[in-house]
Amino acid sequence: MLKLSNETKQFMLDDGTVDYGSLMRYWRKHVMQWKSAQILADVYNEILIDEEPLTVRAIQRMEQHNRVPMDEKRRRLLATILNIPPAYFGLTHLTPYSLPISEISLSTLLNAPIDINEYTARLQDLWIHWTDYVVADVLVDVLTRIHSLQETLIYGTSRQRNFIALLLCQYLILYGNMRRDQGYSDSAITFLDKAIKLANEREYQELGAKAFYLKGYAHFDKWGIQDDKLKDRKQLQLATNSFQSALMLARKSQKKEAFNGPLNSAIVAELGLVGAYSAQSEKDKTKALNTIDEASTIIQQPNFHRDKQFMYINDEWYHIDKAEAYVALQWGYEAIHQLDNVERSNPQTRRRYVYTDIVEADAYLTKGQIEMSVASAENALDFLEDIQSFLFVTRVSNIYNTLRQDKTYATSPDVARLGGKLLKVQHAYLF
C-alpha cells in the first residue's frame, strides 16, 4: 500500500485507494499557492503547445471527480508542474537522465588499407562537419581509422611510420573531441591521453598542446555538470593543470612552427575562465579577467586564421568565455552585457549558441531575474530537442533544480514550465 505523509493521508479513500484529484487540488492551491486553476492550464498548454489545450473546466473535473489522467505522459507532466512527488501521484520514479552506454571496442574493428591523402582530407572534413553526419556512423569510421593506423604503425615500414604516427595522433585528438562534445568525458580523456603520449614520444608539441587543451575541457565539463560545483573542485584543478600544460607546449611549438592563434587564444581563454571559478581574492579575479582578455588580443591580430583541424575559435568564443567568467564572479550585469556581442546568427555554430543561452540563464540567475533566466534556459531547451547534448541538458537541469529548491522561486509558474519542458527533453519517449 502507498505510504503517504501525514499531510496527504487525508486523501486516502475508504477502499484504500487515493483520491488523486483532491490531492492534486491541494497541491495546486496550498503547496504551489496557485489559487486559480487557470495558472495550471496556462503552464500545461505552454509545454504541450501542439496538442489540444487543457481547459480550466477539465482541471476542475480532475480535481472534483478524481479524474486525473491515467496515461503516463499527462499524469507525469501534471506531477512535474505541480512538484508532486511521483509516488504520491501513483507514479514510479523515472530512471535518472544519463548518457547511454556507448563505446566501441577497437578489437571488433576490421583493418582497412590506408590512403594518406584520403585520411588527411577526411580528418579536415570531420573537424568542420562531423555533426552533420550520423554520429554513430562517424564514430565507427574514426575508430576504424585509428585501429588501422595503430596496426600500420606497428607493422609498417619506417618511412610509413612517420606519416602514420602523425595521422594517428591527429585522429586520436579528433575522436577525443567528438566524445567530449557528446558528454563522454572519461572516454574523451582516455583517447586524449593516448594522443598526449604519442605527441610526447614524437615531439609533436602543437598536437600535444591541442590534446592537453581538450583534456582540460573534458575535466571542466565534468566539473561543470556537478550539482554542487563549489563542493568538489578536483575536476576544476585537473582542468587547470591540463590547460597550463597546453599553454607550455603551445609556446614551445612556436619555436618550430608558425604561431597558432586559435589554439593559443582558446587556451588562455579557458585558463582565465577556470581562474575566475577558482578566484579567492580581488587580485585573483583581476588576473583571471586579464588572462581571458589575452585571447581577445590574439584574435584581433591580422595573422589570426582559422585552424581547420581544431575548434572554430573567433571573437564570439572570447565573449562567451568572458561572460561565463563574470558569472563565476557573480557579476551578472557584466555577463549579460558581454553576451550582447554574440550575434547567434551562424547556423554552423548552433551548439555554441545553446551554451550561450545557458550562460545567459546563469547570468540572469545571479541577478535574481528569474523570468529572464527561465526564458534563456527555455531557448536552450528548444535547440536541445534537436541537438542531443547530455552536458547542456544537465546544465539546464541544474538551473531548474536550483530554482525549484529555493523557496522564493519554487512556486513560480515560469519555473514549473521549465520543469515540464525539461521533462520533454530528458524523457522524450513519454511524448
Image (spheres, rainbow, N blue to C red):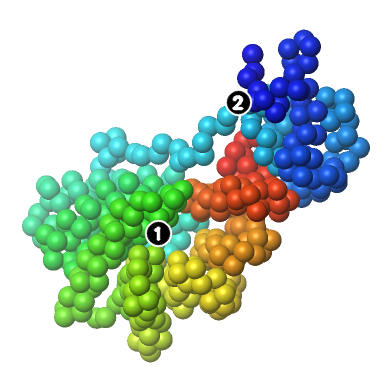
Of the two numbered discs 1 and 2 in the rendering, the one whose residue sits closer to the viewer: 2
Q: Is residue 89 visible?
A: no
- Report the front residue among 91 and 343: 91
Q: Secondary structure at mark 2?
A: loop
Seen at 85% across and 36% down, the residue is: 59
Q: Quadrant of residue 308?
A: bottom left
Residue 162 vertical placement versus 82 (above, below): below
Looking at the picture, which amino acid does disc 2 mark? Thr
Q: Is residue 283 visible?
A: yes
User: Residue 311 placed where, x, y %?
Assistant: 39, 67
- Report the residue at 30% width, 37% height from top: 105
Mark 1: amino acid: Leu
Residue 92: give its label. Answer: 2
First in sequence: mark 1 vs mark 2: 2
Residue that mark 1 sits on: 126
Of all residues, the one furthest to the front in this rendering is: 6
Vertical placement of residue 175 versus 347, above or below: above
Camera-side residue: 205 or 323? 323
Relative height, residue 242 to residue 305 (above, below)? above
State the image coordinates of residue 102 (x, y, percent, origin top left): 40, 39
Asked if residue 96 lies left or right of residue 234, the reply is right
Q: Is residue 106 left or right of residue 129?
A: left
